[in-house]
Image (spheres, rainbow, N blue to C red):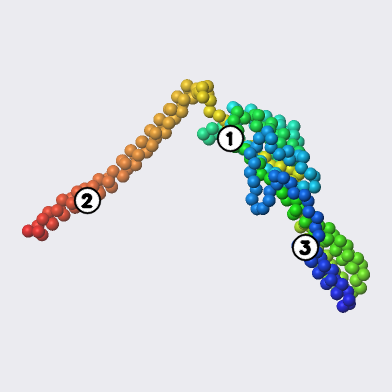
Amino acid sequence: MKTFISILIVLSISLLSSCSNPESPVPRAPQVKGSILGDSAPVYSLSTDSTNYSSISEASRIQISGSISQEVQNISDAIQQIRTLVNQHNARIISSESGNTYNKYGNISILVPKESFNELIESIQTIGTKVTNANILSNDVTEEFVDIQAKLNVMNQTENRFITLLSKASTIEDIINVEKELMRLRGEIDSLNGRIQYLSKITDNSVLNVYMIEETPITGIDWVFFDSLDNSIKSLIFFSKHIANFMITLTVFSPIIIAFGLLFFFGNKYGKKFMHRRRK
């Protein structure tokens, strides 16, 4: 019994030391030029000679995201062209928004495979008449990915040892102790598997945000006389309603205003007479 518990404790300690020891021999992936080092991510301007992220080694795990802001001639046509490009590059739109405040605008977020990232950016840039802002953010998560895989490998081996130990347990107390350790171990394994899946997803695909605004025509071809006249009449009616509301409010409160005015007038008048008599 004591020997069995001792074996259980030794297995647990070996598992913890293997996962937490920073000096444990864990393979490191090669560093990639242009990847992020440290806490902050460098910003790269998009251009024709931008890094070809589809050529990065498969062993490397680089998280890439980009954004483009540009002017277009027609928002509806631009959005339709982007949808066509998204289908051509096996990407998908994860969010889309359009509206009309001061100018018509569109905002689209795209999840695109990393091998199509550069090509899609260049295609989208040709839709606009002017690119006002463009950048790429890259984050190297290779080291974290390799470390998690190493820890996961150690935990899977330890789990197999616990399973073997469970088959040899002879008492209920031993069985309960081993199963308790197995449950804890499997919870940590599931957590690491979830992190591996997340890192794989964000490094196999990139997020591209495209913001477009419809340019204002210099020639004024969008100006329509009757639309302008209609807007002017609406503005006049709106202003007239405010004036009418003010006059109605003034009329309703006029008795109170007059009463306060008279009170102030007579109070001021008799107050001066009273002060004049006291001085004499």
Q: Nearer the viewer, residue 268 or 31?
A: 31
Q: Please tell me whether mark 3 or mark 2 is closer to you in this view.
A: 3
Nearer-N-terminus badge (1/3): 3
The residue lying at 87 percent from left, 72 percent from top is: 7
As shown in the figure, which amino acid type bears the numbered disc 3?
Glu
Category of crowding for the residue at label 3, using alpha-carbon neighbours closer than 10 angstroms: few (below 14), some (14–19), many (at least 20): few
Name the residue at 64% across, 46% down.
42
Q: Residues within 10 Å of mark 2 (few under 14, many from 20)?
A: few
**Mark 2 vs 1: CB contact within 8 A:** no
Whether residue 141 can be seen here: yes
24 vs 100: above or below: below
Q: Is residue 50 left or right of residue 59?
A: left
To which residue does mark 2 refer?
Answer: 263
Residue 34 placement (x, y as % from top left): 70, 44
Image position, residue 272 (x, y; %): 14, 53
The residue that appears at 71% across and 32% down in the rendered structure is: 85
Does dot 1 land on a helix, a strand or a loop? strand
Identify the image quadrant of the C terminus. Answer: bottom left
The earlier-in-sequence mark between 2 and 1 is 1
Question: What's the residue type where badge 2 is placed?
Answer: Leu
Q: Label 1: which residue? A: 132
Residue 23 disc label: 3
> Is 144 positioned to the left or the right of 69 in the image?
right
